[in-house]
Every structure is written in C-alpha cells, then in structure tokens.
Image (cartoon, rainbow, N blue to C red):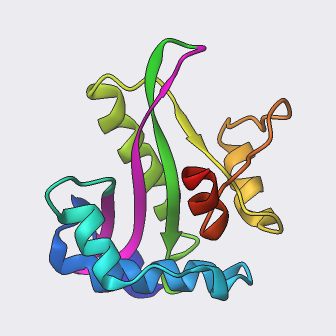
Amino acid sequence: MAETEKSELSFRLAVREDCAAILAALKLLAQSIGVSERCESTLQDLEIHGFGDKPQFTVMLAETGGKMAGMCLYFPMFSTWLGKPGLYIQDIYVHEACRNAKIGEKLLRHVSRIGREEGYAYLRLTVDEGNEGGARFYSNHGFIRSDDEYIYKLIGPAFDAFCDA
C-alpha cells in the first residue's frame, strides 16, 4: 500500500500486450467473490474480442509505479427508454494491495468522464450475488439498484438449441 500512496495514479487504455494482466485480474475478481469456475475467458478470447478486427469491449487501466493497480472493462449500450447511449461496466477490479486508496472510485470516474465526453449519458452494471462490498461501493456513489427488472441469459447448448429451432 505504501508503494501505491507514493506513486502517482495514471490511466491508460489497454493494448493487446495487456491481455495477460487483464485475464489475471478477471480470475482474481472471480476468486474474490467465490466463483473462480465461472471465469472461462482465455488469453485468446481477450485478444480476439478486445483487440481484434471488431473490438467488443474497451479496458481502462489504472497504474501506479508503472504497474497495473486496477482495470475497468466496459462497452457501449443503448437505452430505448431513455433514447440515449450509455456504457455498461462489465468488470472493475482493483488489486488487493492497492485497495483503500480510492483507485476503484477514481477509475470509474475516469471512465465515466470519458464516456460523457463521447456522448454517453449513463452507466449500467450488475453486482454479483454475494458481492456485498461491491453493492455498498456503488450505493455509496449514487448508483441505484434496479428492482423492476430481472437478468436472463441463454448460454452454451441452450443458446445453440434456441438458434437452431
């Protein structure tokens, strides 16, 4: 932590060469909330879908002392109710050694400001069940929990069966 306090915090967009560090952070995030088995992404998945011909997401890195302290993976979305584009925050993670320095808050604010400059009007995210610390963090920063909708997903064989029916 002392290293983090002494080093200046900086932000930069991730590049393909950061994929191993991003994947490691995603695996640590899954582990920290007790769902390690659910993180199936591979290095190749991140390289292809984040830094290939048709990028599906953006990653903003927070760095201290030239090392990754945290990351935020996000992508554009559109609300037909609001009639405005927004950003969906898929994952945000701060390495344990860098916590309690407000890096997560600063990282999220940085992404939010860039989004606003680019014409995005809101943020949306989900908090995994059992991630009480995450829920508290977002509530403390003005996020409101949506009680009027449920998340449904269609994955793997069920997705294929639906497509093929």
> In the depicted view, which residue is nearer to us: 18 or 102?
18
**Image height of 88 relative to 134, above or below:** above
Quarter where residue 141 is shown:
top right
Decide whether residue 66 is among the magenta residues.
yes
Q: Position of residue 8 (x, y in %)?
A: 27, 68
Identify the residue at the far front of this view.
165
Identity of the residue drawn at 68% across and 35% down: 142
**Image height of 139 relative to 22, above or below:** above
Please indicate, yes or no, whether residue 68 appears anywhere in the rendered image.
Answer: no
Residue 164 left/right relative to 21 = right
Residue 50 left/right relative to 158 = left
Residue 132 left/right relative to 65 = right
Quarter where residue 33 is shown:
bottom right
**Image height of 54 relative to 71, above or below:** above
> In the depicted view, which residue is nearer to us: 126 or 163?
163
**Image height of 119 relative to 124, above or below:** above
Q: Position of residue 133 (x, y in %)?
A: 75, 65
Please indicate, yes or no, whether residue 117 appears anywhere in the rendered image.
Answer: yes
Part of the protein shown in magenta: 59-81
Identity of the residue drawn at 24% across and 69% down: 48
